[in-house]
Image: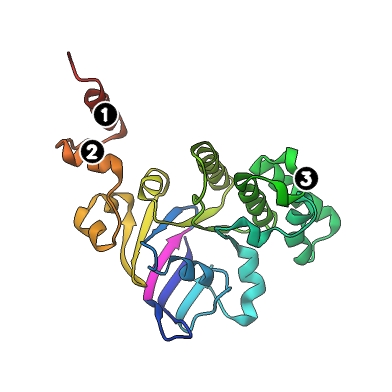
Amino acid sequence: MTILEIKDLSYTYSDQTAALEKISFSVKERKKIAILGANGSGKSTLLQHLNGLILPQAGIVSIKDTIICKKNLSFIRKTVGIVFDNPEDQLFSTTVYEDIAFGPRNLGYTEEKVQECVERAISLVNIQDLSHRPPYNLSLGQKKKVAIAGVVAMEPEIMVFDEPFSGLDPYSLEQFIYLLDNLYDAGHTLLITTHDVDIAYGWADECILLKEGKVLAQGPMDLLEDQLLMKKARLKVPSLCQIFHDTNMQPKTIGEAREALNKLLNPPS
């Protein structure tokens, strides 16, 4: 079932710079989607259209067959949760618990329902030890988790993340990908923006390539193996694909890829 559809979406900044030009694509529910593009390709502007932070100047954005417009914003923002690249933009209460409770309270939930949503979010994101701490003295990775929990507590069906991997060390990155997979397993449709093709290639089901505010391509992740297409997008081919290309290897399955890498790293003596 299609859960998100965009038709001919265009947006121009106040200085007349075109940010998005006739963007069209659709997303089916329970998918992991990577929106990829170089800096300035329109990724963040596109993302802000998905829950009505920016309203379309031209074209249509619809969520579950509901067109995004002022009168539908309450439904849209309950259905689509957005996590910004800088968690500081979403944290402002005195404790982690109060930050996470802010969204459900503003949806008009009873205090019993608020507590239920907060406890579920804290458990899903695995930050039980942080609930009574002030957000301002947490690490970047911890702040990102709290920001995510605040969105999860509002029970959106779709969660969108703007550059979620930026600034994370390798350990925090691994934990974050594990968290994304937990959110997917819990039933959420996930969209991320990133220019990190290596992470996207290993995580997403489908990709959307943007260039200068236009959709260059949409489809399965093997699109990222096309060197000419990636050059047009001003992105690099995933490192794993580049290794196979440079060594004339063409594995068809994960097992074949593992075997090929093992032979490459451990050549016979």
| SS for dot 3 | loop
Residue 121 in the image, given as x and y percentages of width and height: 69, 48
Q: Measure the C-alpha gap from mark 2 to mark 3.
A: 45 Å
Q: Nearer the viewer, mark 1 or mark 3?
A: 3
Residue 101 in the image, given as x and y percentages of width and height: 77, 56
Q: Is residue 243 above or below residue 151?
A: above
Judging from the image, the colouring scheme is rainbow
Task: Name the residue carrying label 2.
Answer: 243
Residue 65 in view? no
Name the quarter where the C terminus is drawn.
Answer: top left
Q: Residue furthest left?
A: 248
Task: Name the residue carrying label 3.
Answer: 133
Question: Magenta segment: does it hold 26?
Answer: yes
- Marks 1 and 3, the one that precedes in the sequence: 3
Residue 125 in view? yes
Q: Are the two marked residues, 2 and 1, in contact with CB atoms closer than 8 angstroms?
A: yes
- Dot 1, how many residues are within 10 Å of its Cα: few (below 14), some (14-19), or many (20+)? some
Residue 258 in the image, given as x and y percentages of width and height: 30, 28
Task: Name the residue carrying label 1.
Answer: 261
Q: Is residue 121 above or below residue 228?
A: above
Which amino acid is tagged 3?
A: Arg
Residue 120 in the image, given as x and y percentages of width and height: 72, 46
Which amino acid is tagged 1?
A: Leu
Extent of the magenta region: 22-28
As drawn, is 45 to the left or to the right of 158?
left
Magenta region, mostly helix, strand or loop? Answer: strand
Q: Measure the C-alpha gap from mark 2 to mark 1.
A: 9 Å
